[in-house]
C-alpha cells in the first residue's frame, strides 16, 4: 500500500471556496452594516496566499446581494497594532479596487480625488509602500460614508473585517505554513516542537473564526519523523482529529496539520486560568496512530464510528463508507438503528441514502467525481428517528487524486478514535472493517 496522505478539510466550510483553509483566508464579509437607514454587507478580498509581489485588495458594498452605487468608504488597514494607512475611497460601482505594490518607505497612494470627502478613486487606485509585504492577519476598520448618493454624507459606525493571507516561514529544519497569522520561531527539544502565534481570544473574534489552520513541516530524515503526534494548544491536549499527518504532498517533507474549529477554541479558552494574547502550539512525537474517527451528536446520546474502504480512493472509483451507530454513554452498537446518510459538496447535496442498521453497523457506497473537489460533508441525520445528527468532513483533492477522511466537524462536542494501529512504515497496516 502506498503512503497515506492526510489532508485537512472542514465540513463547517463546505459552502466556502475549496481553497479556504483558514480564518477569513483571502476573504471576509461584514454583515449588517448600517448606512443611511440601509443594511449592507461589505466584502473584503485579498490574495489568499502571499506571492511576494503585487496584489489586489477589493472592498465591495452590497445591498440585497447587488453592488451599491456611489459608495465612499473610510478604510483603515492594520497589521497587529500598527496602522498601515487610513483614507477615504470612492467607487461609483460599489467596488473599491486597490492595486498594492509592496516597497520600502512610506505608504503612497496614486489615483484621482473626488467627492465631498476628497476620496481616492481609480480603476484601480495604486498603493505603494510596506503594504501586503508578507502573509499574516490583516485587520480592516471600515466606515460607510456615502451609499447610493455621493452628495449625501451619512454617519456610520466602525466595522471590522479580518483577512488572513497564508504564508510559509522557514526556521532551520522546520518550516511553518500559517493560514492565520505570523508564527514565532519554534523551539525543538528532540521530542517536541513548540511555537507561538498572536491571537485575540475575545468572543467577538472567536465567533467568526471558522477554522485556524497551521502546518508544521520538516524533513523525513529528521529524528522528529515518528509514527504519530499529540497536539496541544495553550497546554490543552487536542483531539486526534485536530492533528493529522501528510506524507504525500511535500515529497521529502512530512507535514503535520493543526486544525482548530470555533468550538475547539471556546473549549480551550474556557480551560485557561488567564486569557493570553497568543496561541501556543506544541507538537509531541508518539509511536501510535489512531483510526477510525468517531463523532457524537451534540447531546452525546449517540456516537457514530466511520471508516472507509479502500483507504486510498481515487475519484471515479467506488467508495464504501462503513459505520456503526452506538450508545453515546456505553459505546455499545445499537441494533435496528434508522439513519439517513447525506453527502454534501460545496454546500450542495450530492447523495442521500436512508436505511436501518440492523446490527448497529452497516455501509453505504458512493462514487465521487472530479467535480466534487474540495470539502465534502458526510452527515448522519435523524439517527434512530430522533432528529439528532452528527457529521464528518472529508476532502476530494484532485491534485493528489486521492480522497481522505480527516476531521469530524464541529457538530460533535467530542471526537474519539476506537482503535490504535501500529505500523513500522508509519501508514495503516490494514483496511478498515465494520466495527462491532
Image (cartoon, grey):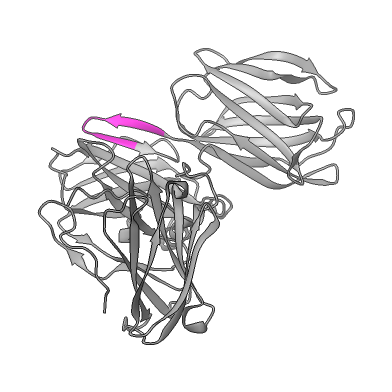
Query: Which residue is farthest right?
Result: 151
- Does residue 357 sit above or below 96 in this rendering? below
Query: Which residue is farthest left?
Result: 424
Tell me residue 378's x, y (percent).
44, 63
- Can residue 238 be spotted in the picture? no
Q: Residue at x 52, y 50 (%)?
A: 209
Tell me residue 113's x, y (percent).
77, 16
- Does residue 92 sit above or below 30 in this rendering? above
- Does residue 125 sit above or below 36 in this rendering? above
**Magenta stretch containing residue 96, yes or no?**
no
Instruction: Report the magenta residues as a range.
Output: 167-176
Q: Quadrant of residue 175?
A: top left
Q: In the visual, does 228 lie left or right of 10?
A: left
| Secondary structure that dominates the magenta span | strand
Tell me residue 354's x, y (percent).
47, 75
Q: Residue at x 51, y 34 (%)?
A: 80
The front one of 123 and 213 is: 123
Q: Which residue is drawn at 50% across and 40% down?
A: 25
Q: In the visual, does 325 lie left or right of 107?
A: left
**Magenta stretch containing residue 168, yes or no?**
yes
The front one of 256 and 160 is: 256
- Can residue 360 be spotted in the picture? yes
Tell me residue 256's x, y (percent).
28, 46
Q: Which residue is drawn at 34% across and 60% down?
A: 319
Image quadrant holding the C terminus, namely: bottom left
Q: How many discs mark residues in the rendered view?
A: 0
Amino acid at each position: 500500500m502506498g503512503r497515506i496522505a492526510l489532508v485537512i478539510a472542514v465540513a463547517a466550510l463546505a459552502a466556502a471556496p475549496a481553497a479556504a483553509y483558514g480564518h477569513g483566508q483571502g476573504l471576509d464579509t461584514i454583515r449588517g452594516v448600517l448606512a443611511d437607514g440601509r443594511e449592507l454587507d461589505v466584502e473584503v478580498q485579498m490574495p489568499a496566499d502571499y506571492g511576494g509581489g503585487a496584489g489586489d485588495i477589493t472592498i465591495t458594498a452590497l445591498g440585497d446581494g447587488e453592488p451599491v452605487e456611489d459608495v465612499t468608504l473610510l478604510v483603515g488597514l492594520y497589521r497587529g497594532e500598527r496602522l498601515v494607512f487610513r483614507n477615504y475611497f470612492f467607487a461609483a460601482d460599489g467596488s473599491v479596487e486597490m492595486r498594492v505594490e509592496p516597497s520600502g518607505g512610506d505608504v503612497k497612494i496614486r489615483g484621482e480625488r473626488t467627492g465631498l470627502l476628497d476620496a481616492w478613486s481609480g480603476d484601480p487606485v495604486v498603493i505603494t509602500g510596506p503594504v501586503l509585504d508578507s502573509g499574516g492577519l490583516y485587520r480592516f476598520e471600515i466606515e460607510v460614508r456615502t451609499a447610493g448618493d455621493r452628495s449625501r454624507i451619512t454617519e456610520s459606525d466602525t466595522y471590522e473585517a479580518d483577512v488572513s493571507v497564508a504564508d510559509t516561514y522557514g526556521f532551520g529544519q522546520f518550516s511553518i505554513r500559517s493560514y492565520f497569522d505570523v508564527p514565532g520561531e519554534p523551539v525543538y527539544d528532540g521530542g517536541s516542537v513548540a511555537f507561538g502565534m498572536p491571537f485575540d481570544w475575545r468572543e467577538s473574534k472567536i465567533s467568526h473564526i471558522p477554522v485556524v489552520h497551521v502546518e508544521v513541516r520538516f524533513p523525513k530524515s529528521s529524528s522528529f519523523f515518528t509514527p504519530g503526534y499529540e497536539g496541544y494548544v495553550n497546554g490543552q491536549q487536542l483531539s486526534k482529529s485536530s492533528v493529522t499527518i501528510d506524507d504525500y504532498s511535500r515529497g521529502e517533507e512530512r507535514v503535520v496539520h493543526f486544525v482548530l474549529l470555533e468550538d475547539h477554541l471556546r473549549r480551550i479558552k474556557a480551560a485557561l486560568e488567564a486569557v493570553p494574547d497568543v496561541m501556543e502550539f506544541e507538537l509531541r512525537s508518539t509511536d501510535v496512530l489512531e483510526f477510525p474517527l468517531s463523532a457524537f451528536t451534540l447531546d452525546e446520546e449517540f456516537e457514530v464510528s466511520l471508516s472507509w474502504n479502500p483507504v486510498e480512493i481515487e475519484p471515479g472509483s467506488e467508495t464504501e463508507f462503513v459505520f456503526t451507530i452506538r450508545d453515546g454513554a456505553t459505546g455499545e452498537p445499537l441494533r435496528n438503528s434508522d439513519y439517513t446518510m447525506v453527502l454534501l459538496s460545496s454546500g450542495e447535496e450530492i447523495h442521500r441514502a436512508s436505511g436501518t442498521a440492523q446490527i448497529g453497523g452497516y455501509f453505504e457506497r458512493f462514487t465521487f467525481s472530479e467535480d466534487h473537489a474540495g470539502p465534502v460533508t458526510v452527515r448522519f441525520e435523524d439517527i434512530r428517528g430522533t432528529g439528532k445528527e452528527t457529521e464528518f468532513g472529508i476532502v476530494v483533492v484532485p491534485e493528489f487524486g486521492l480522497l481522505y477522511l480527516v476531521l469530524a466537524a464541529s457538530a460533535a462536542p467530542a471526537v474519539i478514535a476506537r482503535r490504535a494501529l501500529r505500523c513500522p512504515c508509519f501508514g495503516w497496516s490494514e483496511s478498515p472493517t465494520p466495527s462491532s
